[in-house]
Image: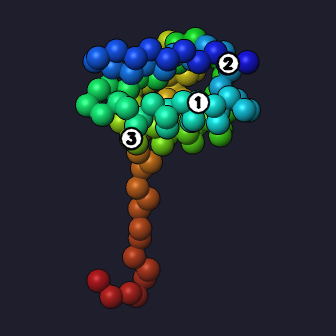
Amino acid sequence: MLKITLHDSALEFRITLEGRLTGPWVAELEQCWQTASSTTAGRRTILDLGEVDFICPDAEAVLCRMHAQGVEFLAETPIIRSLLHDICEPAPCGTVEKKAGSAP
């Protein structure tokens, strides 16, 4: 179960979640965000995950897209903070090594 609360003010649009972000709630969050994003030009958009205790892999993909579009995240628990850190940090580049005998 997930509770989604929307707070709309002149300075920011905040989505507050409580519960488990999984199953049908992932699509519900994405729909709320897509609908809201059409009206948030020039304002901060914040996703408050302070009361979330689980995030499934499908939700991680949605959060990654949200972050890429400028949504800021708030989290309280170490596990959710760690997960958000992994989502928000760019993946490290791999090292490409030259094959022996190939041209420089």
Can you tell which quarter of the image residue 41 is in?
top left
Q: Tag 2, which secondary structure?
A: strand
Q: Which mark is residue 2?
A: 2
Per the image, label 1 sits on a secondary structure element best described as: helix
Question: 67 and 103: which one is in front?
Answer: 67
- The answer to whether one can see residue 100 in this image is yes
Q: Earlier in the sequence, mark 1 or mark 3?
A: 1
Residue at left offset 65%, top offset 40%? 58
Vertical relation: 35 (above or below) 19: below
Q: Quadrant of the N terminus?
A: top right
Instruction: For the residues labelled 1 and 2, say whether their Cβ atoms are less than 8 Å apart.
Output: yes
Instruction: Estimate how packed mark 2 is, as few (under 14), some (14 to 19) or many (20 or more) residues with alpha carbons within 10 Å.
Output: some
Q: Mark 3 or 2 closer to N-term?
A: 2
> Residue at point 39% right, 41% down?
69
Distance of mark 3 from mark 2, alpha carbons? 23 Å
Q: Which mark is residue 69?
A: 3
Question: How far, Cα to Cα, is label 1 from label 3?
Answer: 15 Å
Q: Which residue is mark 1?
A: 29
Residue type at tag 2? Leu
Residue 53 pos. (x, y %): 64, 17
Residue 19, position in %: x, y?
Answer: 66, 15
The residue shown at (57%, 35%) is 31
Vertical comparison of 70 with 16: above or below: below
Where is residue 100 drawn, in percent x and y? 43, 82
